[in-house]
């Protein structure tokens, strides 16, 4: 089932992004979108079926959705509006899978934290295999380079469930690396560095998936996990990647270069802090893309 309805363009959970200028547009062409933005366009609402439900952490459920509609597509980093039959409130959740998974298997993945928001409560308490929902793509926070674009490095800065859109971008970057390595064509990715902070290691989502990519591309992808309230022993396999304490501005400054783009997603104080730090370090605004969640 495909439904075409007009939608109100809004920043995805407070998204502010200069992605359009990162690779192609000039700063004068940038649009900064917030919840107060009023722009209408027609967008596809597509039926989806839940084909996988799992606990990603004590507080986060991971969903795998089958979206058969061929008109449904997304860019790495975007979110979906999430429509649940019988629930009047529309959810908004970032996609954490890569566009390649959708192209090959018609699947997308979401990771949803437990809150009192009705869509999140439904996912945690009522959602089962074969539940039917609907989804609609949105958001100006994305990484979508074209083959002729200049090679860029990425620094991805995540806090808590802010890892979701950045994992999508990380997975997309890995797909681009594979295509370049195997076929010698497509977009030539630079390096990718992920800095990811959570309360403790149990709340570091997708640890294994991330480390698998680090091990697959040791010269191209690196990560640093930060934990702020760890009370248990850190496992030996994670220890080399763990720093106890918050991500610091010094770490971020170490990766500044004219070829590097910064993507930040997490709680508003975190995104505000790092975006301002980068601007004060003279990183061009068009090289900084951030999204807030609350």
Image (cartoon, grey):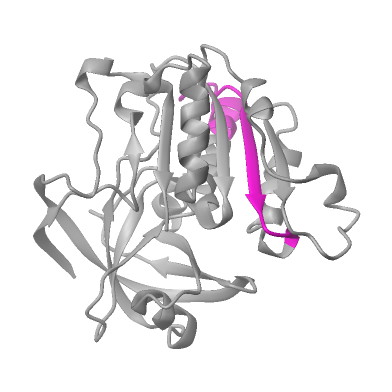
Q: Is residue 178 magenta?
A: yes
Q: Residue at x 15, y 53 (%)?
A: 43
Q: Tally the marks.
A: 0
Image location of residue 141, percent across then percent down: 36, 40
Q: As drawn, is 64 to the left or to the right of 13?
A: right
Residue 23 coordinates in the image, percent (x, y) = 36, 20
In this picture, is 73 found above or below 174?
below
Whether residue 64 is visible here, answered yes or no, is yes
Residue closer to the observer: 29 or 137:
29
Q: Is residue 286 left or right of residue 201?
A: left
Q: Is residue 13 left or right of residue 97?
A: left
Which quarter of the rendering shows the N terminus?
bottom left
Image-quadrant location for residue 272:
top left
Q: Is residue 185 visible?
A: no
Give the camera-side residue of 121 and 109.
121
Q: Is residue 244 magenta?
A: no
Which residues are drawn in magenta? 176-201
> On the image, which quarter does residue 143 sit in?
top left
Query: Whole-percent x and y of residue 172?
Result: 50, 40
């Amino acid at each position: 089932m495909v439904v075409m309805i007009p939608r109100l363009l809004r920043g995805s959970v407070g998204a502010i992004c200069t992605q359009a200028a990162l690779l192609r547009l000039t700063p004068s062409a940038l649009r900064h979108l917030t919840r107060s933005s009023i722009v209408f366009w027609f967008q596809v609402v597509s039926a989806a079926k839940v084909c996988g439900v799992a606990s990603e952490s004590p507080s986060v459920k991971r969903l795998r959705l089958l979206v058969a509609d061929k008109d449904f597509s997304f860019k790495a980093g975007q979110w979906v509006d999430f429509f649940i039959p019988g629930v009047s409130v529309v959810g908004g959740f970032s996609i954490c899978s890569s566009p390649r998974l959708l192209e090959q298997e018609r699947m997308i993945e979401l990771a949803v934290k437990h809150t009192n928001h009705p869509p999140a409560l439904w996912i945690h308490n009522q959602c089962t295999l074969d539940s039917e929902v609907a989804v609609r793509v949105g958001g100006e926070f994305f990484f979508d380079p074209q083959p002729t674009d200049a090679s860029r490095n990425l620094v991805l800065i995540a806090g808590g469930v802010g890892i979701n859109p950045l994992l999508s971008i990380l997975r997309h970057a890995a797909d681009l690396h594979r295509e370049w390595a195997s076929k010698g064509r497509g977009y030539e990715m630079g390096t990718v560095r992920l800095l990811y902070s959570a309360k403790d290691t149990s709340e570091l989502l997708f640890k294994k998936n991330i480390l698998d990519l680090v091990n697959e591309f040791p010269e191209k992808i690196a990560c640093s996990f930060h934990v702020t309230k760890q009370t248990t022993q850190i496992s030996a396999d994670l220890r080399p990647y763990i720093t106890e304490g918050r991500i610091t501005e010094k770490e971020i400054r170490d990766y500044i270069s004219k070829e590097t783009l910064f993507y930040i997603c997490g709680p508003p104080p975190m995104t505000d802090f790092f975006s301002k730090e980068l601007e004060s370090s003279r990183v061009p605004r068009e090289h900084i893309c951030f999204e807030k969640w609350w």
